[in-house]
Image (tube, rainbow, N blue to C red):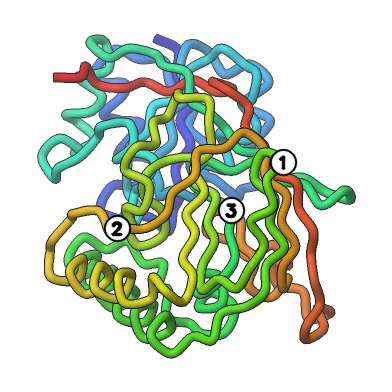
C-alpha cells in the first residue's frame, strides 16, 4: 500500500520515532510518505494521501488529521501513542501487545474500513470538528484553571498520570457549585444548574471517563451526559472507582441527540482536549458562549480490527 504516515514527535516518549515507524512500514512492503505533525506543510501530504493515512500519536493528533479528512474516502489507521487513547479504544484497539506498531501494521490487511461519526460545534463565527466530545463544567474548568490534566504519554507513567487526573477531577466535582447552562436537546429545553454537561461522540473522553456506554462510532447520534447537583455523589463514586481500576459505568442521565444548543461560561467550555477559547488572554470573567452542536454521520473512515 501507499501510506501517508503522520507521527507526533512528543508522543510515546520517543520509544518509537517517526524513522522507526517508517522503517517498520517499509519492511512490510509499504510505500511510505512520513511527516512529523506540526512541521511546516505537514498537512500538504493529504493532497494525495495514497491508500491509507496513518496517525501515530494520541487523541489530539488523531483529531487534527481526521478533521482534514472529513468527507474523504481514504481510511485512517491509528497507532495509539497518547495517554488515554479514547479514539483507539472506541475502535477496539486495546491492550499493550496489540498496540505495538509492528503488530498493528501487520494486522491492517485483515481490518475493515468503517465510517466514524464526527461532531461539529459552531458559535456562528467559527466551527470545530470533534471526535470525542464538546462540553462544559468541571472537566473544562479543570483544563482552564489548573495544570492537573497532564499530557505525557510515557508508557511507564501513563497510568499514574491518568490516576492523578481522575483525582483532580474528583476533587473539583466534590467542591463544585455548578453553573447555569442554557441547553436545548432536539428542541426540548433542558436548561438548569449542572456540574457537568458533555456532548459525547464516543463512549470515553478525557482521562478515560466512560460516561456514555451506549455510544458507538457509527450510530449517527450524539450522547448528552447531564450531571446536576443530585448526581454529584454518583459521579464522585465513579471517579474514585475508576482510579481503583473499576471500569463500570456510572448511573447518570444520558440523552441521545441529533442537535444541541447550549450557552455557558466560555472559560469552562472545551472541544475534545482543548479549550474553546484556546490560549486567549482576552476572555473576560463571566463571558458566555453559545454553541450549536450536531453530528456528521460516518464523515471519516478508520480501520478497525474485526469484532469478535
Please report whichever mark, 3 or 2, sits nearer to the chain's N-terminal start: 3
Residue 31 in view of the camera: yes
Q: CA distance from mark 3 to mark 1?
A: 19 Å
Q: CA distance from mark 3 to mark 2?
A: 21 Å
Residue 128 in view of the camera: no
* Disc 1 element: loop
Query: Going by the image, does 104 lie left or right of 296?
Result: left
The picture places residue 127, in percent across and down from the top left corner, at 77, 45
Depth-wise, is mark 3 or mark 1 nearer the camera? 1
Disc 1: which residue: 187
Determine whether 271 is above or below 220 in the image: below
Residue ID at (54%, 86%): 177
Quadrant housing the N terminus: top left
Q: Quick one: 264 or 112, which is closer to the camera?
A: 264
The picture places residue 24, in percent across and down from the top left corner, at 26, 29
Q: Mark on residue 251?
A: 2
Q: Quick one: 220 or 184, which is closer to the camera?
A: 184
The picture places residue 264, in percent across and down from the top left corner, at 72, 68
Residue ID at (46%, 76%): 229
Query: Label 2 crowding class (10 Å Cα cut-off): few <14, some 14-19, many 20+?
Result: few
Query: Going by the image, does 55 lie left or right of 12?
Result: right
Disc 3: which residue: 134
Depth-wise, is mark 3 or mark 2 nearer the camera? 2
Query: Going by the image, does 81 lie left or right of 39?
Result: left
Residue ID at (75%, 46%): 292
Q: Quick one: 185 or 156, which is closer to the camera?
A: 185
Q: CA distance from mark 2 to mark 1?
A: 25 Å
* Disc 2 element: loop
Please report whichever mark, 3 or 1, sits nearer to the chain's N-terminal start: 3
Amino acid at each position: 500500500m501507499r501510506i501517508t504516515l503522520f507521527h507526533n514527535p512528543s508522543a510515546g516518549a520517543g520509544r518509537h520515532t517517526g524513522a522507526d515507524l517508517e522503517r517498520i512500514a517499509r519492511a512490510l512492503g509499504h510505500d511510505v510518505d512520513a511527516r512529523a505533525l506540526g512541521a511546516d506543510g505537514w498537512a500538504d501530504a493529504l493532497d494525495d494521501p495514497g491508500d491509507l493515512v496513518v496517525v501515530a500519536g494520541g487523541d489530539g493528533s488523531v483529531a487534527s488529521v481526521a478533521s482534514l479528512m472529513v468527507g474523504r474516502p481514504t481510511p485512517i489507521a491509528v497507532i495509539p501513542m497518547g495517554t488515554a487513547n479514547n479514539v483507539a479504544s472506541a475502535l477496539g484497539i486495546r491492550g499493550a501487545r496489540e498496540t505495538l506498531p509492528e503488530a498493528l501494521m501487520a494486522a491492517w490487511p485483515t481490518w475493515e474500513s468503517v465510517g466514524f461519526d464526527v461532531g461539529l460545534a459552531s458559535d456562528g463565527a467559527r466551527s470545530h470538528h470533534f471526535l470525542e466530545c464538546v462540553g462544559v463544567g468541571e472537566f473544562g474548568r479543570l483544563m482552564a484553571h489548573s495544570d492537573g490534566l497532564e499530557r505525557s504519554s510515557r508508557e511507564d507513567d501513563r497510568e499514574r498520570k491518568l490516576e492523578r487526573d481522575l483525582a483532580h477531577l474528583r476533587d473539583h466535582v466534590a467542591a463544585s457549585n455548578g453553573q447555569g447552562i442554557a441547553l436545548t436537546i432536539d428542541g426540548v429545553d433542558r436548561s438548569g444548574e449542572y456540574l457537568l454537561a458533555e456532548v459525547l461522540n464516543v463512549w470515553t473522553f478525557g482521562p478515560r471517563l466512560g460516561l456514555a456506554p451506549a455510544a458507538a462510532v457509527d450510530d449517527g447520534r450524539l450522547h448528552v451526559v447531564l450531571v446536576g447537583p443530585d448526581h454529584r455523589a454518583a459521579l464522585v463514586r465513579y471517579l474514585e472507582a475508576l482510579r481503583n481500576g473499576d471500569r463500570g459505568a456510572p448511573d447518570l442521565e444520558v440523552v441521545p441527540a441529533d442537535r444541541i444548543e447550549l450557552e455557558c461560561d466560555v472559560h469552562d467550555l472545551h472541544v475534545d482536549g482543548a479549550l474553546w477559547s484556546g490560549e486567549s488572554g482576552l476572555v473576560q470573567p463571566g463571558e458566555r458562549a453559545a454553541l450549536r452542536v450536531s453530528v456528521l454521520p460516518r464523515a471519516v473512515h478508520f480501520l478497525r480490527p474485526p469484532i469478535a
